[in-house]
Amino acid sequence: MRLIRLMGALAALTLAAPALAQSAAPVMASSPDGTVSVAVTIDGDGRAAYAVSRKGTAILAPSKLGFLFTDVVKLDRRIEVTGQELRDFDETWTQPWGEWTTIRNHYREFKVHFRETTAMARVFSVTFRIYNDGVGFRYEFPDQPNMRHTNIAEELTEFAFASDGTAWWKPAFLWNREEYLYNKTALSAVANADTPITIKLADGTHVALHEAALVDYSGMAVARTEGNTLRAALHPGAGEAKVRKHGAWNSPWRTLIIADDAAGIYMSHLMLNLNEPNKLGDVSYIKPGKFAGVWWNMIKGEWSWARGPKHGATNENVKRYIDFAAANGIPHLLVEGWNVGWDGDWFGNGHDMDFAKPTEDFDVKMLVAYAKKKGVRLIGHHETGGAASHYEKQFDKSFKFAADHGYMVVKTGYVTDAGQMEREDADGKKYREWHQGQWMVNHQLRVVQVAARYKIGIDSHEPVKGTGLHRTYPNWVAREGMRGMEYNAWGGKNPPEHEANVVFTRMLEGPMDFTPGILSLKGERDSDILSTIAKQLALYVVIYSPVQMVADTPENYAKYPAPMKFIRDVPTDWSETRVLNGEIGDYVTIVRKQRGAEDWFLGAVGDEEARTVSFKLDFLTPGKKYVAEVYRDGEDADYRTTKRHSIVIEQRAVTSTGEMTLRLAPGGGAAVRFRLVK
Ligand code: NOJ
Ligand code: CA
């Protein structure tokens, strides 16, 4: 379904040169229903700025636009506005998989043209797409004699918040990439932060600052300058310039989602809408589903990726895991450590990795045939150890190997410290790149494009952050880019509030391969995970991914047959999603409707405090009867005690006129399947 309504009358209001003097009509526009407005101003020094307001209240005070370059004078002062254009757009499009089947893209586009009044006379435009729930804007530079080659040292783009607030953010530019816990501080105390950063302003308005369609550019972090002002801080690369461009170019969209509350932030489609439509055509080869994995025992240190006495990916182990997947209707099995190359120092040194050469104890032909008989497909794993160019050299043989063995997805990995990614150019020269720098942004897209040629999906670990590109490349099914479940295997575990933080921050990027479902609640050396068992079930609904791991071991799942039923039942593809309630870092309740079916699934997670959540069931179809299969924390459940496994599983008859109250234990959660009675 593709319904485009370009409102002709408004479509092209163009005020062309001569330049609008400062005294001329204001340069401003509003969203389709008038909620969000953008105004562009030029100050006495000729500095261009934009301001954003919502319902008449300032969100961003005038915030500067501009660039520093490594080789020519900055673009900052002595700028004039030479024109503005308005265009309305309203379209509804369909996602091949996702949290919603259809998405409305309704905005007013406001394009402002600028020119330098100096001899350089550089020209550019800033295009704002103003939505009722936020705004995205990007710089657009035409090809021009004074900008044939552009070497960007830094963007001067500011986000000058008009009031202080509370910010949830994780640090940028540190060695462990995007794998840090979220800080909760005053906005006026933010340091270097990666995006998305989510802010609750003093009046309760919520704002999420991020970027969309990050292509051939470096990732944008933000750094606080003074007061409540954040400024773009681009991720570095190996070269002097953080971004290099030739001829005409656009920046990614700088985005602000603005809503009354945390739930409203999650419900926005602005990120996806600012990306271009599907460029791959038919992606029916991507079938959302769950996967088991020869994995958790490696993460816990009981098995090894490397060959030897502890090797995990042996024929015997893999066959046992295939049996487990088949018995539980799980269509995929990830196997790590299956290939030659792990035996040395793979961590940060992936030169030995060969993604077409299995180890001698992994008989790929036999295993693929065994799995096929049981309705299971293997998922491939390409851990590069950061040797990104070495990976590129074997792209074709690696993806041919995966396709020849019927894999739907390949999980990639870039385990090395920030700034230590290895690039090798055609002339043999080596460079150290950053995970979010321009070169790696391009590398990650090259992986997705080569995978698409082989009809394979990509789940990237240690990735570039998500910016909605899975709309354009729907084979980019998931990524990591935060502290997932693996941190619960090790010391310094994720605290109970982690998931209630990430729903309203990291999850705005798109699908996350979080690897939920550790029902044993045990990490390495029998250490306790800071969760209840009901919360592990809730994560299947709360943390979205079209490919969702059933991450614990078959032996552990055998101990919990009753809760395991929810994992068997829960799907990974949805026609509708609603956030029923939530406060960042405290709790959240999400319901989702199974795609192509009538059942709804609910997940609620809390933090370290016990609380109750109540909500109406008006998402259910009126006049229909449902059985709510409830998996909730037992009365004595508590993540701090041996009662973390205490769970109550019960059934309740419900309809759309009812309400439900669920008690979440400390560190707890709840999961519900609303099964339609036929
Ligand atoms: C880190 C990834 O997050 C994890 O899933 C993977 O098993 C290891 N790297 C090894 O590649
Ligand atoms: Ca909290």
Image (cartoon, rainbow, N blue to C red):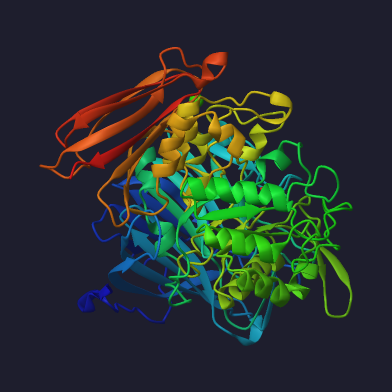
Q: Position of residue 279 (x, y in %)?
A: 47, 76
Q: For the image shown, how many numbered marks are present on the structure?
A: 0
Residue drawn at point x = 31 percent, y = 66 percent: 108
Q: In this view, does 25 lie above or below 379?
A: below
Residue drawn at point x = 38 percent, y = 81 percent: 16
Q: In which quarter of the image is residue 632?
A: top left
Location of the C terminus by quadrant is: top left
Q: Quadrant of residue 75?
A: bottom right
Q: Where is residue 617 in the image (x, y as percent from the top left)?
A: 22, 35
Note whether residue 160 is visible.
no
Q: Position of residue 69 (x, y in %)?
A: 70, 68
Is 236 left or right of 506, judged from the image as shown? right
Q: Where is residue 480 in the image (x, y as percent from the top left)?
A: 60, 50
Choose between 155 and 478: the one closer to the eye.
478
Choose between 220 and 98: the one closer to the eye.
98
Q: Quadrant of residue 365?
A: bottom right
Residue drawn at point x = 52 percent, y = 40 percent: 502
Q: Is residue 249 above or below residue 64?
A: below
Choose between 139 and 669: the one closer to the eye.
669
Choose between 170 and 62: the one closer to the eye.
170
Is 595 left or right of 555, judged from the image as shown? left
Q: Is residue 168 above or below residue 636?
A: below
